[in-house]
Image (spheres, rainbow, N blue to C red):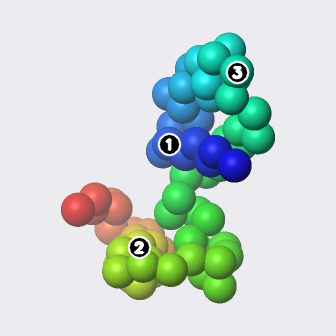
Amino acid sequence: MIIIYAKDERSGIPYATLLSQKGFENIYFLSGGIEDFVENYPEFCDGTGVQQIINVKLQQEILKKEGINTIYF
């Protein structure tokens, strides 16, 4: 299984297309990027960066509620 993810779906589609043209099968595209996947399905994630992704998302939501522009690290 090959999972392709990108922050912007348009930038990942050419890679999925190329892999398909080269004969690879079971190619999937993760819409919304890895950050959204971690936020929605943390039970399926493992690794040192998972908690950091969740923390950044939470901080962005707090800042948005307070009317502060989101800052990316």
Residue denoted by label 2 = 53
Determine the residue positioned at 33% across, 67% down: 68
Q: Which mark is residue 23?
A: 3
**For the residue marked with disc 1, what is the amino acid?**
Ala
Q: Earlier in the sequence, mark 1 or mark 3?
A: 1
Q: Residue furthest top?
A: 21
List x then y, in percent, for residue 10. Answer: 57, 27
Q: Secondary structure at mark 3?
A: loop
Determine the residue positioned at 69% across, 29% down: 24
Q: Is residue 3 above or below residue 66?
A: above
Determine the residue positioned at 42% across, 79% down: 47
Q: Toward the viewer: 51 or 22?
A: 22
Q: Earlier in the sequence, mark 2 or mark 1?
A: 1
Q: CA distance from mark 3 to mark 2?
A: 33 Å
Q: Residue furthest right?
A: 26
Residue denoted by label 1 = 6
Determine the residue positioned at 65% across, 85% down: 43
Q: Which mark is residue 73?
A: none
Q: Secondary structure at mark 1?
A: loop
Q: Is residue 51 above or below residue 24?
A: below
Disc 1 crowd rating (10 Å Cα; few below 14, some 14-19, many 20+) is: some
Q: CA distance from mark 1 to mark 3?
A: 22 Å
List x then y, in percent, for residue 62. Answer: 42, 80
Q: Which label lies toward us, 1 or 3? A: 3
**Which quadrant holds residue 45?**
bottom right
Residue 71 in the figure: left or right of residue 28: left
- Dots 1, 3 in contact, CB < 8 A: no
List x then y, in percent, for residue 28. Answer: 71, 42
Disc 2 crowd rating (10 Å Cα; few below 14, some 14-19, many 20+) is: some
Q: Is residue 25 above or below residue 33?
A: above
**For the residue marked with disc 2, what is the amino acid?**
Ile
Q: Toward the viewer: 28 or 56?
A: 28
